[in-house]
Image: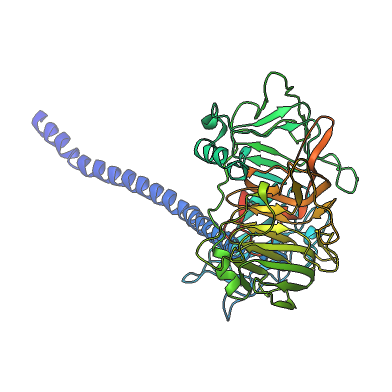
Amino acid sequence: MPDVLKRLQLRSERGITMFLVVVAMLVTTMFVAAAFAAVNGDLPVSGVAVERKSSYAAAEAGLNFYLNRLQQDPDYWTKCDTGKAPNSGELNPVNQLGASPLRWRTIPGSSDEYTIELIPAPGYTSCVVGKQYTFVDMNTGTFKVKVTARSYTGQGRTRSIVATFRRDSFLNFVYFTNYENRDPSAEDDDTERARQVKYCADRYRSARAGNNCPEIQFATADKLNGPLHTNDDNLLICGTPTFGRLVNEDGTTRTTKTDYVEVRGGGTGHVANGTSCADTPTINTPTGKFSVNAKPLALPESNAELLAVAKNGGTYYSGITKIFLRGNMMDVTTSNGNKTTSPLPNNGVIYVDNASASCDGEIPTRANYDEATSCGNVYVSGTYSQPLTIAAANDVIVAPTDPNNVGNADIRQTGSNDAVLGLIANNFVRVMHRVTRGSSCTNTNSLAYPTLTNIRVEAAILALQHSWIVDNYDCGKAGTLTVSGAIVQKYRGPVGTGSSSGVATGYAKNYWYDDRFLYRSPPYFLTPVAAAWDIVREHEIVAGS
């Protein structure tokens, strides 16, 4: 009997293993189901992430589209939303902010698409063609666009980028210099000029120290009415010069300080010019100080690229050329004596080339205007009502060119439009100043050549290899030289001499920045790339999914 019970007990445990296997499989199945549910739940989230990344890439493509248009045409922004479509069969993707419906562009080879909206300037509701202040913030010289993209046509899920554009250009400054010393090539004495060319040229202040290089200071009477940039180590100060504007040229008060002084060197950016000079500048900048360690801006070596532009839709001359501007027309006298009257060129570029392989140009401190007729020098004055750039293979000379008004060398913008002028010389941009040297040094003053007293130049001035300078600045006394625009030069160029008591020779400076150069440039000024707008700020607006 006990044996029978024992066998029955063993027989009753015979199915326990199968039961455990079934339970284990059930638990495993539950884990697999839970894992699948979790992964399957993440699939929509993963899809959204992929789509959002694709949308962001499409938005950046739209931003690059607009930037590329600006690089090809720096005035593309002035067209607002009226620019041409990128290709036939496509719509122009640039819209007014909030336009309905928006024009979208599909990225070639993709179903992703983008649209661009122009964000108007503060106080305005739209970008208006011909009224740049409706789009550009006049205080900062910036404008903004909003680029929205979606990864699949018709999907509501989008991403938007807002980008701020600003022109990174020499034209951002009323006064730009590469070197703060006097131009060695303007030295009157041959021996001294050769010495300075050897020891002072193409060197920043720390590298030319101890070489007796003529350094130019900013003194108490100097006022820089606009932003300034130098690639040199610092600025020399003697007294209390003023940097930055509190008023406009017309005397109206500026509501905010917007003028920066940028110096490539460190420290404070300014030092006293010797122990007898105070280093106490008045600094009317937004920060109340100089911006130091600034990014250097390199000058092009030549304006030769403008030659091709002038030959293709512009106007080309060679040898000494005299141009009298008359609104949208010009009277031109060429080196062979031919006189013509014609409209300003279609693409806005005039180039005066050397008529021979070389040109023995004048030294500004010896100028008597008898240079060889083969020199690519252009003499210019008058008024202009269209955007224009005048470039010379050698020098540009501001001088009377109207035979009926030989005492007037002014260059002024006329009319109510936004015409701007560029004067670009490979060497010097000069102001004519005739003098008589001898036992005394006086102005030349005759019926044919009256003394030029006060002169006004409304232009962006660029001297690539040398300076903006007054001829014979150390001899004879004239009046005031006013520039309303921008001055860009490799070396500092003197316009006169003097002391704390006033001007002794040449001209007194009166330089004012033309704020239009924050957002406009003369045609092909420098190169299209050098004058391009750059993205200075970019951020995303996160839209609801």
- Residue lying farthest to the top in this orientation: 275
Q: Residue furthest bottom?
A: 89
Viewer-closest of 92 and 149: 92
Front-most of residues 216 and 415: 216
Q: 249 or 340: which is nearer to us?
A: 340
Could you tell me which residue is drawn at 51 percent across and 31 percent down? Answer: 207
Residue at the left extreme, as displayed? 3
Q: Can you tell which quarter of the image residue 394 is in? A: bottom right
Q: Is residue 119 rendered to the left or right of residue 35?
A: right
Please identify the quarter of the rendering in which residue 102 is found: bottom right
Q: Is residue 374 visible?
A: yes
Where's residue 88, x and y in %? 58, 81
Q: How is the image coloured?
A: rainbow
Q: Position of residue 525 (x, y in %)?
A: 64, 60
Relative image position of residue 424 (x, y in whole percent): 64, 58
Q: Determine whether 272 is above or below 229 in the image.
A: above
Which quadrant, please, contains the N terminus?
top left
